[in-house]
Image: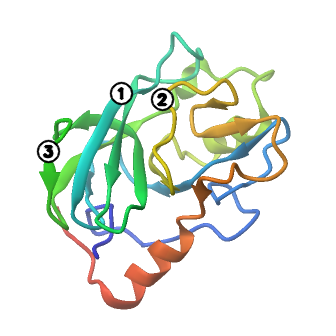
C-alpha cells in the first residue's frame, strides 16, 4: 500500500471529531470520508492496485456557489473494497482502467473558493476558509459501489443521517496502516 498524496507534506489524519475526520458532525450533515490537505496540483496515488469503476464531477459552483469544479474517481480494490478519491482538479485515469499501487490517479483540487464564502454559509466551511484548507484529497471507502447521485449525499457529506450508511466504511484504519509501513512519495 502507498500513501495517497504526494509531495513532502506532513502525513496527518484527522482524529474523530476534528475537521476533516470521518463522520465529523457538521451540524446539518456528516462528513463521509477523510480529508488530506495538500496544495492544489499535488499528485494523488492509488493506495492499492484496482480497477476504475467511475469518474464524475464531484463539486461545482453550479451546485454550490463556494465550490470550485472538482472530480471523483471510484476505484475497486482486489479485496472488493471501493475507494472514492474526490475533490480532484484533474483525473489521469479512465473508466475500466486497471491501475497499479502507487500509480498517479489525478491531482488535488481546490474545492473551496474562499472569495465566495459568505457569513451565512455553514460553519465548517467558514473554518476551512479561515484555516486556509481550500485544497485537499477527500477519501471515502465503501463495501458496495456508491451511488453517483444519492439524494442524501452532496459534496462528501450525508444529510439527515445520524449513523453512516451500511456500505460506508471509515478509511482512517487504511491510512493508519499505510503510515506504519510506507515512506512518503515525493513529486
Which disc number belongs to residue 92? Answer: none
Residue at the farthest top position: 62
Q: Residues within 10 Å of mark 3 (few under 14, many from 20)?
A: few
Q: Are marks 3 and 2 in contact (CB under 8 Å)?
A: no
**Which percent across, then down, holds residue 109?**
36, 38
Question: Which residue is more in the foreground, 127 or 16?
Answer: 16
Question: Which residue is more in the foreground, 177 or 41?
Answer: 177
Residue at (14, 63) in percent of width and height: 100
Mark 1 or 3: in front is 3
Which disc number belongs to residue 56? Answer: 1
Q: Are marks 1 and 2 in contact (CB under 8 Å)?
A: yes
Residue at (62, 55) in percent of width and height: 20
N-terminal of the pair, mark 1 or mark 2, is: 1
Q: Which residue is mark 3?
A: 97
Q: Residues within 10 Å of mark 2 (few under 14, many from 20)?
A: some
Residue at the farthest bottom position: 180
> Cα distance, mark 1 to mark 2?
8 Å
Secondary structure type for disc 1: strand
Q: Which residue is mark 2?
A: 148
N-terminal of the pair, mark 3 or mark 2, is: 3
In which quadrant of the rendered view does residue 56 lie?
A: top left
Amino acid at each position: 500500500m502507498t500513501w495517497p498524496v504526494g509531495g513532502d507534506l506532513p502525513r496527518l489524519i484527522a482524529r474523530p471529531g476534528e475537521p476533516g475526520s470521518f463522520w465529523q458532525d457538521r451540524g446539518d450533515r456528516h462528513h463521509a470520508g477523510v480529508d488530506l490537505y495538500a496544495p492544489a496540483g499535488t499528485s494523488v496515488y492509488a493506495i492499492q492496485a484496482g480497477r476504475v469503476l467511475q469518474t464524475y464531477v464531484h463539486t461545482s459552483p453550479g451546485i454550490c456557489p463556494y465550490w470550485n469544479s472538482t472530480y471523483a474517481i471510484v476505484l475497486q480494490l482486489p479485496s472488493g473494497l471501493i475507494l472514492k478519491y474526490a475533490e480532484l482538479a484533474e483525473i489521469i485515469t479512465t473508466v475500466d482502467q486497471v491501475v497499479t499501487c502507487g500509480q498517479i490517479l489525478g491531482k488535488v483540487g481546490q474545492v473551496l473558493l474562499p472569495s465566495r464564502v459568505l457569513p451565512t454559509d455553514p460553519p465548517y466551511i467558514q473554518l476551512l476558509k479561515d484555516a486556509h484548507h481550500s485544497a485537499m484529497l477527500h477519501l471515502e471507502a465503501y463495501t458496495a459501489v456508491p451511488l453517483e447521485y444519492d439524494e442524501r449525499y452532496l459534496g462528501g457529506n450525508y444529510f439527515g443521517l445520524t449513523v453512516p450508511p451500511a456500505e460506508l466504511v471509515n478509511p482512517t484504519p487504511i491510512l493508519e496502516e499505510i503510515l506504519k509501513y510506507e515512506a512518503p512519495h515525493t513529486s
